[in-house]
């Protein structure tokens, strides 16, 4: 009978997956084409650090190592068991392992019946599970390798919900000269989650940057709290996720939902946590190459250095598209560069060597040194032929290799980054640069995008998010929502709540026309015929109220002063509590064409004034606020105040699934007025009760009845014309 491992061995919550004292691969195989073979081979590579056991009934020996038919036949209880047996056999193996005292399980097999119940048995026994359906584990610090594939040790950690995407990231990293510090394929997450594994990287010594692939963010707030932790420990996170396929399903009830997509929300969460979302695995590895360079890029000023005017111009364009600046150089610096180059060279920015590299390859080193030590730029993007000279002309090999070493020493000497695009990115020279900590890319767009991504990530320190919440139920209806927003500091026109014509006419005497009449309880008033604008006097109000009441019935109506100011810009301010990612605030071009323009920005709530100003500045319609074509400038600070107020409000309701929307917010020189507001409790949320549903039912019934009445009236009119002989 094997000796049991003491309960609680290891000081870290996930120590069994970090550095287990012993490992057993159950389902090991002698067939190199099978998973069990790869897991056995990888595990055996770490047997200088831990004992490794291979369990199988199919062979007496695998890779020169004796096997055992079951866990009970081993001489010790392994700390970690890798499950690589057919799905139907997983549960019996787990039950036997738990009886023996196994502390950790790596579930490789997918499609395990009753996986959730099996995980519950594991956790009830104070053991832990990664998977099932995991591609495996690798840890360079502890020589732990229980996964399909080979890994080059390095500084990039990969946590992936998809094993194959994670494997692709590792392969791309190898081609780029990067290595993997830790690789974890999370599988089904029935116990250990992505958030757990991210938190576990905070003190992982060799990890310099983290790659996260997630297909969903049900536990998004905890995931991004872990990202914040990693950011504070100097380990930036790059996020890769699936696209916008859920957008249509989430767009049903409010304009704000229709205007944002899942990736908009993930981008907002990344900005708030100090992470960066990237579009593809290749893009992720490219940015990671810059982040793990000996001197990572910081600052947006870039000097472009090339031996071709055309390539330099293209590189400058790529840098500009990535949000970088390519500043003009000072006359003194330009003159110093010119003294080192032929008369035909370009000495501004981009710098064009104009063939000097072919005459003397060390000119690259000299010009790069001048640029990096100048203080006028934050990084140098070297683009073009360097790295190819030795491939095409053997007599230049030694000089190019020597220059590569000298170039690679410059970033550390001057504290500024060097990024290289080379037409010979697979050459020995490129390998020398990569080996010395300088990232090299095969295309200039990849080089510029990676540089821009690393700079953008460096500019995102992340921010702490408020966790203050309220137990108050959210209000229902326009009048109550209006009151809530006014208490938060949002200005509305003067208004009165009325229930009958007598009260409506009394309100006319107290308010200033023209007037707006609203059926306060309706969510979408315009579509249901529950709003009338431009009511100039008591007669118009009487006619409008009488007609609306006939169609919609009793209820709380609102008579409101209509905002008729000239020179206003309409915005939409929306907020929502996403079930996974938490409270969000959205600002965009508003009014009836909001969904047409789709000019919106979203951030995690709450935001501060600086964040709100930045949101406004990112809108395409932002120039309208500074006095477009002679129009008066709008009161930007009033918008900032309202965005901050709405963000704080929705953050207080973070535990309640609500959507809040002001549309439009009319912004002019004298301030901002919210002229309509909507607060929705999402399905199954608080406030979505029978009374609310009854109002919606009555509105829908009235709307359909009104359409039927109008259709019948039109039909009778056509029949009368036919009877009179009209066409």
Image: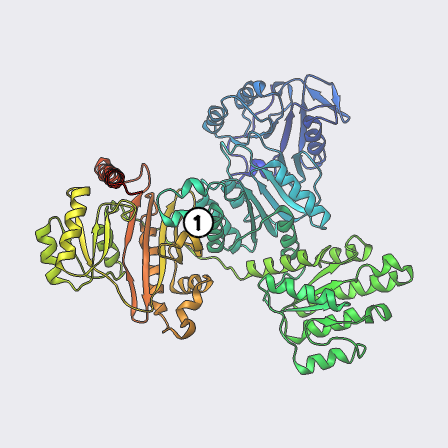
Task: Please tell me whether residue 330 is drawn above or below residue 465 in the rendered image.
Answer: below
Quadrant of the image occupied by residue 38: top right
Task: Tell me what residue is drawn at x 48 percent, y 53 percent.
Answer: 273
**Total numbered labels:** 1
Q: Nearer the viewer, residue 278 or 710?
A: 710
Residue 231 placed where, x, y %? 52, 54
Compared across the picture, whether 349 is left or right of 705 comes to right
Task: Tell me what residue is drawn at x 60 percent, y 68 percent.
Answer: 325
Residue 710 seen in render: no
Q: Nearer the viewer, residue 175 or 223?
A: 175
Residue 41 placed where, x, y %? 72, 31
Compared across the picture, whether 358 is left or right of 563 comes to right
Q: Nearer the viewer, residue 697 or 380?
A: 697
Image quadrant containing the N terminus = top right
Q: Nearer the viewer, residue 12 or 480?
A: 480
Q: Residues within 10 Å of mark 1 (few under 14, many from 20)?
A: many
Residue under numbered circle 1: 260
Residue 53 seen in render: yes
Quadrant of the image occupied by residue 46: top right
Residue 654 placed where, x, y %? 34, 47
Compared across the picture, whether 138 is left or right of 522 comes to right
Task: Tell me what residue is drawn at x 76 percent, y 27 percent.
Answer: 63
Compared across the picture, whether 139 is left or right of 194 comes to right
Image quadrant containing the C terminus = top left
Quadrant of the image occupied by residue 316: bottom right
């Amino acid at each position: 009978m094997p000796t049991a491992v003491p309960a609680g061995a290891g000081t870290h919550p996930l120590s069994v997956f970090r550095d287990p004292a012993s490992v057993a691969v159950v389902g090991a195989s002698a067939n190199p084409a099978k998973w069990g073979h790869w897991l056995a081979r990888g595990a055996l590579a770490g047997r200088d650090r831990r004992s490794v056991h291979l369990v199988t009934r199919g062979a007496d020996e695998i890779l020169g190592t004796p096997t055992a038919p079951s866990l009970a036949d081993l001489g010790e209880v392994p700390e970690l068991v890798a499950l690589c047996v057919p799905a139907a056999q997983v549960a019996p193996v787990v039950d036997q392992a738990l009886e023996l005292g196994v502390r950790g399980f790596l579930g490789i097999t997918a499609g395990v019946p009753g996986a959730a119940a099996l995980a519950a048995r594991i956790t009830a026994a104070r053991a832990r599970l990664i998977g099932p359906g995991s591609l495996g584990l690798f840890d360079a610090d502890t020589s732990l390798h229980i996964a399909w594939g080979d890994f080059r040790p390095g500084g990039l950690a990969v946590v992936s919900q998809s094993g194959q995407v994670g494997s692709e990231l590792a392969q791309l990293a190898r081609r780029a000269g990067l290595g993997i510090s830790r690789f974890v394929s999370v599988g089904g997450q029935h116990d250990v989650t992505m958030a757990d594994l991210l938190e576990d990287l905070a003190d992982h010594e060799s990890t310099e940057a983290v790659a996260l692939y997630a297909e969903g963010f049900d536990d998004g707030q905890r995931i991004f709290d872990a990202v914040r932790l990693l950011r504070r420990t100097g380990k930036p996170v790059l996020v890769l996720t699936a696209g916008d396929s859920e957008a249509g399903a989430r767009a049903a009830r409010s304009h704000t939902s229709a205007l944002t997509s899942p990736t908009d929300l993930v981008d907002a969460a990344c900005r708030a946590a100090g992470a960066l979302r990237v579009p593809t695995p290749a893009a992720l590895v490219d940015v990671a190459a810059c982040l793990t360079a000996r001197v990572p890029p910081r600052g947006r000023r870039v000097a472009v250095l090339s031996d071709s005017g055309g390539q330099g111009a293209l590189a400058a364009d790529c840098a500009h598209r990535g949000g970088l600046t390519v500043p003009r150089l000072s006359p003194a610096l330009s003159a110093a560069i010119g003294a080192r180059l032929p008369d035909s060279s370009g000495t501004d920015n981009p710098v064009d060597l104009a063939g000097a590299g072919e005459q003397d390859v060390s000119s690259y080193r000299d010009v790069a040194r001048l640029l990096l030590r100048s203080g006028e730029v934050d990084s140098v993007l070297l683009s073009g032929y360097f790295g190819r000279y030795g491939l095409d002309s053997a007599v230049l090999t030694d000089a190019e290799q020597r220059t590569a070493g000298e170039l690679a020493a410059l970033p550390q000497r001057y504290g500024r980054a060097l990024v290289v695009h080379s037409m010979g990115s697979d050459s020995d020279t490129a390998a020398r640069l990569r080996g010395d900590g300088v990232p090299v890319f095969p295309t200039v767009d990849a080089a510029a995008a990676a540089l821009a991504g690393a700079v953008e990530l460096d500019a995102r320190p992340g921010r702490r998010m408020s966790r203050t919440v309220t137990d108050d139920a959210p209000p229902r209806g326009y009048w109550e929502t209006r009151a809530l927003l006014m208490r938060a500091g949002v200005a509305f026109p003067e208004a009165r709540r009325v229930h009958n014509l007598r009260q409506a006419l009394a309100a006319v005497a107290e308010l200033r026309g023209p007037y707006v009449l609203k059926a306060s309880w309706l969510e979408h008033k315009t579509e249901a015929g529950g709003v009338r604008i431009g009511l100039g006097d008591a007669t118009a109000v009487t006619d409008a109220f009488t007609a609306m009441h006939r169609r919609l019935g009793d209820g709380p109506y609102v008579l409101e002063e209509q905002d008729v100011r000239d020179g206003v810009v309409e915005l939409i301010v929306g907020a929502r509590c996403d079930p996974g990612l938490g409270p969000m605030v959205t600002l965009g071009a508003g009014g009836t064409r909001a969904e047409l323009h789709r000019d919106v920005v979203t951030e995690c709530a709450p935001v501060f004034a600086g964040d709100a100003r930045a949101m406004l500045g990112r809108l395409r319609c932002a120039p309208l606020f500074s006095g477009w074509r002679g129009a008066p400038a709008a009161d930007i600070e009033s918008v900032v105040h309202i965005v901050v107020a709405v963000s704080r409000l929705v953050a207080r309701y973070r535990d309640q699934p609500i959507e809040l929307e002001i549309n439009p917010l009319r912004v002019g020189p004298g301030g901002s007025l919210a002229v309509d507001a909507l607060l929705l409790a999402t399905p199954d949320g608080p406030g979505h009760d029978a009374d609310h549903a009854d109002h919606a039912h009555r509105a829908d019934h009235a709307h359909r009845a009104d359409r039927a009445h109008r259709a019948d009236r039109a039909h009778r009119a056509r029949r009368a014309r036919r009877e009179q002989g009209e066409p």
